[in-house]
Image: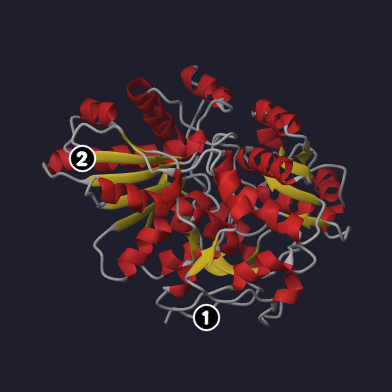
């Protein structure tokens, strides 16, 4: 198979269980707590999520069966192909083998439907009729709109205002699938109205949009909130990416030296990486690399602390690397990577030394995306471009060292709804933005009076 470009699995080879990394962690994940530092139980989450998803959130079982209706929905686009970027390898003149899991083959064009259809199913089975959510770049909003349509639920999406303006076609995609999409902050909620009164020209943030969505969700017994990243059950559903990749790698007798994913909230990174983190925990020699923007450097510069997932502090406090729940990121084009906190499980894996992190400028990432488009043809999402830029760095290092290196990364989505960013890049309008130290200190000051996570074992 030395001339392969795509490695496929038959539908009968699809994983039929999700992988839960909590079963293999060397030390347990710190629990969610209230503002006094007291651990909270599942009942505290019941107004926001259905109990069947809460059970997954707190589970430490290694394997969780995928229900048949979810399998049926996933087979619309899964198994996704594992591909080799041969043309990029040639262009870089590298001895590295570059492989990527193509999650852009889903109907909305990203990895997000892997959990969207699952969350819609579990909510439907619990008797919920309507889901409310937030979205940054629009990938998650599009995915949940489709998932709700498949499972017969209503859907409303609060979209971060800067992305709502930058990516109008994402809003239209949601509307095609029957969802309502509004810019956040909005006049619909107390949180939105308060923020607009104080800063009417705010670009918005995921923290704000989450507050609005939760505020609306808790007012109706038949409505629940759905989150596209960060939480344990979301990362669980995404593990199908890495599980498929492991089966595909076995077919060509390869194993990666480095596994790479872009990271905002953590879902696509964890989805590919966590099955390989399990291998690392059990002695396999593999590097795990998360890539984020310099404008929102959660893993690379933020403190590890208990913080809320939203600006109005409606969520429990989670132990994570965080820039502070009030952080409003610069309006870089990688909208899906503009979240103030990193998933607790991704943060825990990083804190345990099982992964490493890299922050990149958006100009380097767009240059990498252009190089990819010129060689491999596909136009990457701005989020995906961060992973590609890191891949190019790894491939260039392999060339300089004269050593073969197997590089695996997650193609988390295409950029066909993000062409305004490419237009700005091509016309020289994009600049890099490094979060200043004083702004970082201001945004993380809100953590001073919150409970502190336990010291690292």
Using the numbered discs, state the Cα–Cα distance from disc 1 to disc 2 in whole angstroms.
41 Å
Furthest residue in direction top, as rendered: 427
Vertical placement of 5 versus 117: above or below? above
Q: Secondary structure at mark 1?
A: loop
| Position of residue 84 measured from the top left corner of the image (x, y, whole percent) | 30, 35
Q: Which image quarter holds the C terminus?
A: bottom left
Residue 112 visible, this angle: no
Mark 1 or mark 2, whichever is nearer to me: 2
- Mark 1 = which residue? 454
Vertical placement of 259 versus 164: above or below? below
Q: Residues within 10 Å of mark 2 (few under 14, many from 20)?
A: many
Q: Residue at x 43, y 30 (%)?
A: 366
| Position of residue 184 measured from the top left corner of the image (x, y, whole percent) | 76, 42
Q: Which image quarter holds the N terminus?
A: top left
Q: Residue at x 46, y 57 (%)?
A: 299
Residue 208 is left or right of residue 284, and the answer is right
- Mark 2 = which residue? 96
Vertical placement of 317 versus 163: above or below? below
């Amino acid at each position: 198979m030395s001339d392969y470009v795509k490695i496929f699995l038959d539908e009968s080879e699809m994983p039929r269980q999700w992988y839960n990394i909590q079963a293999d962690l060397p030390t347990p994940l710190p629990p969610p707590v209230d503002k006094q530092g007291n651990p909270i139980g599942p009942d505290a989450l019941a107004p926001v999520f259905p109990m069947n998803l809460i059970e997954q959130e707190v589970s430490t079982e290694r394997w969780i069966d995928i229900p048949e209706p979810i399998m049926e929905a996933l087979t619309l686009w899964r198994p996704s192909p594992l591909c080799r970027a041969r043309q990029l390898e040639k262009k870089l003149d590298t001895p590295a083998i570059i492989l990527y899991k193509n999650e852009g083959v889903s109907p909305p064009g990203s990895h997000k439907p892997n959990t969207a259809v699952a969350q819609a199913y579990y909510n439907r089975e619990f008797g919920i009729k309507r889901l409310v959510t937030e979205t940054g770049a629009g990938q998650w909003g599009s995915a949940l709109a489709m998932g709700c349509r498949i499972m017969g639920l209503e859907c409303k999406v609060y979209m971060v205002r800067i992305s709502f303006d930058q990516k109008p076609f994402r809003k239209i995609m949601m509307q095609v699938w029957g969802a309502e999409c509004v810019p956040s902050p909005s006049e619909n909620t107390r949180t939105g109205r308060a923020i607009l009164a104080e800063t009417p020209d705010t670009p918005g943030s995921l923290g704000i949009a989450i507050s609005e969505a939760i505020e609306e969700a808790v007012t109706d017994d038949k409505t629940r909130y759905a989150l596209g990243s960060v939480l344990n059950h979301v990362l669980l559903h995404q593990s199908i990416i890495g599980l498929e990749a492991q089966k595909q790698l076995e077919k060509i007798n390869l194993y990666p030296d480095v596994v790479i994913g872009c990271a905002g909230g953590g879902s696509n990174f964890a989805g590919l990486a966590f099955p390989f983190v399990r291998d690392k925990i059990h002695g396999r020699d593999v590097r795990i690399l998360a890539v984020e923007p310099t404008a929102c450097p959660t893993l690379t510069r933020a403190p590890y602390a208990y913080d809320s997932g939203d600006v109005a502090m409606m969520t429990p406090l989670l132990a994570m690397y965080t820039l502070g729940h009030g952080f409003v990121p610069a309006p870089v084009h990688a909208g899906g990577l503009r979240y103030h906190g990193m998933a607790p499980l991704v943060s825990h894996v990083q804190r345990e030394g099982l992964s490493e992190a890299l922050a990149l400028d958006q100009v380097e990432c767009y240059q990498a995306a252009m190089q990819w488009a010129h060689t491999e043809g596909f136009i990457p999402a701005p989020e995906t471009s961060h992973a590609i830029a890191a891949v190019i760095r790894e491939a260039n290092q392999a060339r300089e060292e004269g050593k073969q290196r197997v590089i695996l990364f997650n193609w988390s989505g295409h950029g066909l709804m993000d062409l305004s960013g490419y237009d700005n890049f091509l016309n020289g309008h994009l600049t890099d933005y490094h979060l200043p130290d004083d702004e970082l200190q201001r945004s993380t000051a809100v953590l001073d009076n919150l409970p502190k996570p336990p010291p690292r074992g």
